[in-house]
Image: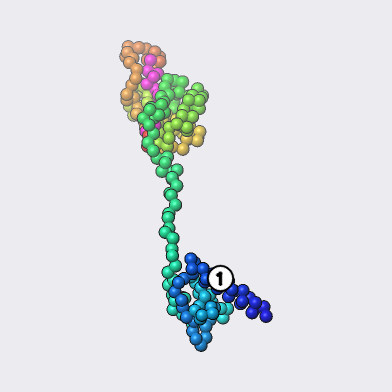
Amino acid sequence: MRHIIALSLLLGSALGFAANSSFAQTTDVQAATEKSAYLQDGRGPIVRSQDGLCWRSGYWEQNDAVTGCDGTLTPPVMKAIAPALAENPLVANTEKVPAAIVAQCNVTLSSDQTFSFGKATLTKIAKQRIDQEIIGKLTNFCGSGTIIVTGYTDRIGSAKYNQKLSKQRATSVAAYLKSKGISNRIDVVGAGESDPVSSCSKKLSHKRLIDCLSPDRRVVIKMQGN
């Protein structure tokens, strides 16, 4: 009795959907006369769902398939519209940093407040200046471009020694920037005694010459931009 009631409800629903011409497939498929594993309406055609699919009975098997029901259906298909592509934040961040901002990100750490004479270790005063004046700029305004750190020495000593010392100074600054969370790529350059900014007489005593050449002992932090 339960099977008869369930089958009647299923058949009633199927007939209701088939009667709605806006949903049902318009092509009728006749059930097999001897045996049919599909539900049929009163006229004989197989009942279809609102999606145009034929209603199968509980004992349907692959061998019961009929042409028009289990072949390719051609219901109306809505035109698919692809959603708008979201902006990739990684791509957005690759925009070039304006030249004016890049210029503001270029900083020179000069004089013996940064390094003691003949040394490559950052002084306490130099670290405080980096913390207060440079880290914030590099983090908030200077973008993700490459940072170039170039070390310089004065002319006292051999060229080979000064070249090595200048790179050690640049490396010290780069390492401190990294320790403060700067994630940009940092290139280190040792420029030795090249490109001096001071003009000191050779007649000065050694002590006065060291003081006079102090501006040459510097490290330049420069934002290359993207």
Q: Residue at x 43, y 24 (%)?
A: 109
Q: Quadrant of residue 220?
A: top left
Label 1 environment density (alpha carbons within 10 Å; few <14, some 14–19, many ≥20): some
- The colour scheme applied to this rendered structure is rainbow
Q: Residue at x 44, y 20 (%)?
A: 112
Of 122 and 70, the residue lying toward us: 70
Secondary structure type for disc 1: helix
Examine the structure image and report whether residue 69 is included in the region drawn in magenta: no
**Residue 108 appears at what percent x and percent y?**
41, 24
**Residue 10 appears at what percent x and percent y?**
59, 74
Q: Quadrant of residue 210?
A: top left
Which stretch is magenta? 212-224
Examine the structure image and report whether residue 216 is included in the region drawn in magenta: yes
- Res 127 visible: no
Q: Quadrant of the C terminus?
A: top left
Residue carrying label 1:
16
Above or below for 20 versus 88: below
Q: Quadrant of the N terminus?
A: bottom right
148 horizontally vs 63: left or right: left
61 horizontally vs 6: left or right: left
Above or below for 59 versus 149: below
Quick one: which residue is furthest to the bottom in this view? 34
Q: Residue at x 56, y 70 (%)?
A: 16
**Residue 223 appears at what percent x and percent y?**
39, 31
Q: Residue at x 41, y 43 (%)?
A: 91
Of 196 and 55, the residue lying toward us: 55
Q: Quadrant of residue 143?
A: top left
**Residue 66 appears at what percent x and percent y?**
46, 80
Disc 1 marks a residue whose amino acid type is: Gly
Of 101 and 18, the residue lying toward us: 18
Of 180 and 192, the residue lying toward us: 180
